Amino acid sequence: MTLDTTYIRGTMAAILSVLQHSSCPQNIAFHFIASASATATTSILRATISSSFPYMNFQVFPFNDSSVSRLISTSIRSALDCPLNYARSYLGNLLPSCVHRVVYLDSDLVLVDDIAKLAHTQLGDNSVLAAPEYCNANFTSYFTPPFWSNPSLSLTFANRKACYFNTGVMVIDLDRWREGDYTTKIEEWMELQKRMRIYELGSLPPFLLVFAGNIAPVDHRWNQHGLGGDNYRGLCRDLHRGPVSLLHWSGKGKPWDRLDTDRPCPLDALWAPYDLLQWQTPFALDS
Ligand SMILES: *[C@@H]1O[C@H](CO)[C@@H](O)[C@H](O)[C@H]1NC(C)=O
Ligand SMILES: *[C@@H]1O[C@H](CO)[C@@H](O)[C@H](O)[C@H]1NC(C)=O
């Protein structure tokens, strides 16, 4: 997970939910990625975590924001343009080579099931990552008309059954990632995006370009996403049909903001029990 002031309330809630639903919490190692330029803030965040979870095994790794800043193009939602949002593309380099597989998690979610089940997802012989796929989503809409009308670009998806997946919950084989140098492949698409606008969102489309159609499936229960509402108006969303192992407030609205302003969506009540920092955030963590 990433670690920063803006999302610390979400991060703490996510950690608590992971530990609470794990049958073997002592087997879980958390790896947090924090901005290398915010060392003072990071030590406060680190202290916040260790005082709430004194027995938890965790490490914080610094992320050089400026290494990715030059590649970021503005998106339709400014929160998506923050460099740390791109840290998920650099896990292969950021984490030690003895870390072979990770579950990447966004900070706006809670688990209500044992993360070990997700971590043990079968990746098959070739897949680098696993995530729930949504083949009913309109894949075309994630890329711009200039992208689709340029055959040398749109042919990327030829012979691939490309479906949308959400990059907030991913099981990643870091050995395969490093071996295939997928960070560079993602960066190449970001460089192209700088030159001609091929998509509108932030870190998600490059993942789709590189991986969609080649990922290992994960049951939809592991990413009930979109609970933050849509990117434009933040309307409340309901759960997708089926069982739930993970609730994800992706989208514009965040449950902590809506609860604070007394305008929660109905499902925000499921996040509230994990809100450890309810009374602390504003004064203790002001960066
Ligand atoms: C961070 O990245 C920038 C741009 O790539 C580079 O110039 C700088 O030396 C890096 N900083 C560190 C501490 O590695
Ligand atoms: C999918 O999205 C594209 C671009 O946004 C749109 O032109 C098309 O009509 C959509 N297709 C369906 C089936 O909704």
Image (cartoon, rainbow, N blue to C red):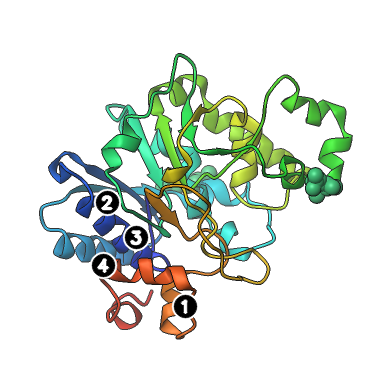
SS for callout 2: helix
SS for callout 4: helix
SS for callout 1: loop
The residue lying furthest to the top in this view is: 125
How far apart marks 1 and 3 lie (CA) works out to 19 Å
Q: For residue 17, which quarter of the picture?
A: bottom left
Mark 3 neighbour class, 10 Å CA radius: few under 14, some 14 to 19, many 20 or more: many
How far apart marks 3 and 4 lie (CA) works out to 14 Å
> Which residue was labeled with disc 4?
44
> Which residue was labeled with disc 1?
264
| Foreground disc of the pair 3, 4 | 3
Q: Earlier in the sequence, mark 1 or mark 4?
A: 4
How far apart marks 2 and 1 lie (CA) works out to 23 Å
Placement of 25 over or under 227, stated as above or below: above
Q: Earlier in the sequence, mark 1 or mark 3?
A: 3
> Which residue was labeled with disc 3?
11
Contact? badges 4 and 2 (CB < 8 Å)? no
Q: Name which residue type carries label 4.
A: Ile
In the image, what residue occupies the spot 27% across and 37% down? 116
**Ligand 2 neighbours mark 1 (CB distance < 8 Å):** no
Count of residue discs: 4
